[in-house]
Image (tube, grey):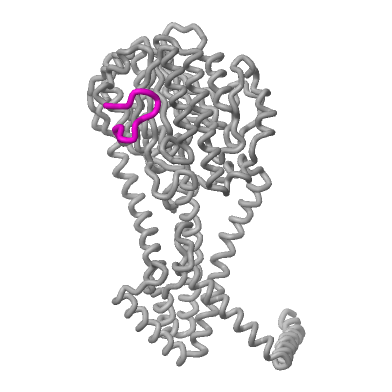
Amino acid sequence: MSETLAETTSPEAEVTEAEKASRYARWRDAHPTAVRNTRWTLNTLAALLVLGALLLPNKITNLHAGEFLRLPAEAILGAALVLALPRRPRLAVAVAAGVGLGVMTILNLLDMGFNDYLGRAFNPVLDWELLNDAQSYVADSMGRGVAIAAMVAAIVLVLLVPTVMTLATVRLSGLLTRHRQRAVRGTLVAATVWITCSALGLQILGPPLASEHTAALTGIQAQRVVSTLRDEAAFEKVAKVDAFGNTPGSQLVRDLRGKDMIFTFIESYGRSAIEDPLIAPGVDKTLDTSTAALAKAGFHAKSGWLTSATYGGSSWLGHSTTLSGLWIDNQQRYRTVMASNHLSLTKAFKKTGDWDTVGVMPGVQKGWPEQKYYGLDKVYNAFQLGYQGPKFSWSTMPDQYALEAYQKQVHSKKRDKPLMSEIILTSSHQPWAPIPKMVDWDDLGDGSIFKAIQKAGNKASDIIANPTRSKQEYGKSISYSVTSLTQWLERYGSDDTVLVFLGDHQPIARVSGENASRDVPISIVAKDPKVLARITSWNWTDGLKPAHDAPVWKMSAFRDRFLTAYGSTKHPSSG
């Protein structure tokens, strides 16, 4: 029965296909110019796509004409290989090359984004999970609709780029074999030109004419993967070694007994805030004013610089580096430390048994298992501070409100022990629009007072693509955060309050500038002169503004220096 059916239907199918071919042939013969132009256009587009992918840089700053006026060695070698292979292997090579070029194009685009925002390239092993954070940031800054559109566009791009690139390489391979003699001559000429340009070091608009750009970037990506895997094993051993790992609680921070300790991180508070000509005037004025106001209230400060382990974002890497004494510059290292017994600075206070420990984390909106590593008895997240006002872009609440909520719910409560607090302030998080403003502390209430301020503020879309306005609004946000913190200290600090506050990282390159340092300011503030006397040998600057030539340490050095300065005894653990 099936054979009869096949015999019945197959000729009709063959006729149908033959008719289609015949119609196309008739159309082609009737419109030779259109056919020729279409083929020429498709061939040109395929060539431009492949050349563009081979020469695409991985930094936005390199997106200029000179980068694309080069002769890629990969194209010459690819053409030679295609011309040398029989049909099936040739097709396989063309498909593989297209997929590979598509993947490299996506990685280069990711590198552009990461270099622009985080000052480093995309890590294909560790950074995929950060894309969820990027989507959340876009949703908070630009709206849920924009975030969904961006996610859909990204998915389409990931699917489309390798597909289109594969079609382009297959088409070009067919074109070369159809015109084999001319293709062979052209390949030999191109190879000769490439070798000559390479030997003479010829350049045009900066980059050398002879390029092996994609091969180099592929090698870098491969090395990045290998280095990441090696680093994971090596760092796990490093994290097990701790100069204070076996120090008894009775021998930790003995010179701070009875002090009300506060460790505060200010989002994106970097060296650029104090030294960039467009930003510094406003921030420096705030620091000078706050220094004077604190002095009037009996507080004094010393300030220096730390070089952050991160840049532009990933604030948790800065927090963990400061408090662990380990250089934590990627997500794998962070996970390793969070799962370890390496002593964090905050946990050192808990280990003594002489402090209650608490964390105030207005940026945390889900479970936070890191609480255990940091030794915090209680953590207040974004939903536990009673805030009923609007979000300010990514920031869930203004810093002034978060500090007042900390005062009411934690700091003002009577207790048998002094308090050690870790507070993360978020109002200076990009995109710096809208920015909250200071209100009377007695009028803060549940935060509803900020609704009018948020509504009247700038929109993120008006700021995010404008470097000058981004700098200006960034400076205002830092001034706001510093003012909130120092006014809180004036208002609620006591003779036994010791405040350590610092930035977690520099702002993104659009604000801090290309090749900016990774330095952040750090200050220690106290009324008790003995507290600051303990760090006289550090040669830090008096006041809240560190001098340009004040000492610069790696952020990972702070924990051990702090513990040593305040009477801790080293009893190393070696894993």
Position above or below: 528 against 437: above
Position above or below: 416 against 58: above
In the rendered image, residue 540 lying in the magenta stretch gets the answer yes
Observer-nearest residue: 226 or 189?
189
Residue 119 vs residue 568: left or right?
A: right
State the residue at coordinates (68%, 91%): 32
Q: Which residues are magenta?
A: 539-553
State the residue at coordinates (57%, 68%): 163
Q: Is residue 7 visible?
A: no
Image location of residue 465, percent across then percent down:
57, 49
State the residue at coordinates (34%, 77%): 197
User: Magenta stretch mostly in which secondary structure?
Assistant: loop
Q: Quadrant of residue 287?
A: top left
In the rendered image, residue 501 lying in the magenta stretch gets the answer no
State the residue at coordinates (48%, 62%): 63
Q: Is residue 147 visible?
A: yes
Position above or below: 274 against 20: above
Image location of residue 226, percent across then percent down:
34, 54
Image location of residue 338, percent across then percent down:
40, 33
